[in-house]
Amino acid sequence: MKKGIILAIAGLTLLVGCGNQQDEATKVPAKPKWQGARYHLAFDTQAAKPNPAGVTIPTIKYTANPDSLEQRVSLVVRFDTSGVKKDGPVMNQMVMAPVDIHGAEGTLPADYMDAADKGLATFLKAYGIKGKVKITVALARSSLSSNPGDAELNAKRLSDWLPVEVGFKNLHPTS
C-alpha cells in the first residue's frame, strides 16, 4: 500500500511538472506577420527631376500590410512654417485629393507627385518661404477631410510620418 501511495505521488508530481512546461510554451506570443502602421513609406533613392514648380518631393514608395489593403489614399504633407513672418494663423499641412493605389507594393503616381509639388510650391510661395524646407509625408484614408484636425488625422492615418528636407526656389516671383 505504501508503494502504491508513493507511486501515485510520483506520478502526480511528474504530471504537474509537465503541465507547467506546456503553460510556459503557450505563454510566448507569436510574432505578428506585420508590425507597425498599415503602410510603410520610403523615398526613392534616385535623384528626382527638378519640377518647374520650384520644389520636388522625392518619389514615395509604399509597402502595405497584405491583410489590410486600401484602394484609395490621400497624401498628407506637413511643412515647417517656423520662418514665416505673417500675422494670423498659418497652415502647416496640405492634404492631397485621393488617389487610386493597387497592390501591396508600389509608388505613388508621377502625375500625383507633380500635383503635390505644385500644391506645396503654392503654399511656400504664399508664405515667403525660400531655401531648404523640412517636410513630413504620410498616407491617410481617402475619407480624410481637406483641413483635418490632429484627432481626425491620427485616426485616419495609414502610415508613420516620413521626414525629408527639400529645396524651394520661387521661379515666378511676384515682385
Image (cartoon, grey):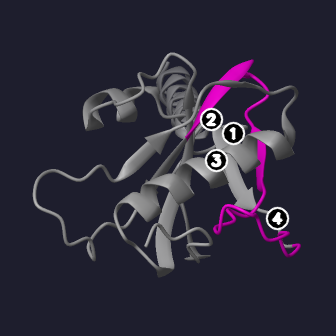
Choose mark 3 or mark 1, whichever is in front: 3
The answer to whether mark 2 and mark 1 are in CB contact below 8 A is yes
For marks 3 and 1, the one nearer the N-term is: 1
**Residue 110 horizontal side relative to residue 129, left or right:** right
Q: CA distance from mark 3 to mark 4?
A: 16 Å
Q: Secondary structure at mark 4?
A: loop
Which element type, helix, strand or loop, lies under badge 2?
A: loop
Residue tagged 2: 38
Q: Residue farthest to the left?
A: 87
Q: Nearer the viewer, mark 2 or mark 4?
A: 4
Can residue 101 be seen? Answer: yes
Q: Assess disc 3: are there few (<14), some (14-19) or many (≥20) residues with their C-alpha within 10 Å of its C-alpha.
A: many
Give the residue pinned by disc 4.
44
Q: Please tell me which of labels 3 and 2 falls first in the chain.
A: 2
User: Taking 38 as reference, is 138 above or below it?
Assistant: below
Sequence order check: which comes first, mark 2 or mark 4?
2
Report how far apart the C-alphas of labels 2 and 1 lie in the structure: 8 Å
Kindly identify the residue that appears in the image at 85 percent across and 76 percent down: 47
Whole-Å distance between the Cαs marked 3 and 1? 29 Å
Query: What's under tag 1, amino acid-wise?
Result: Trp
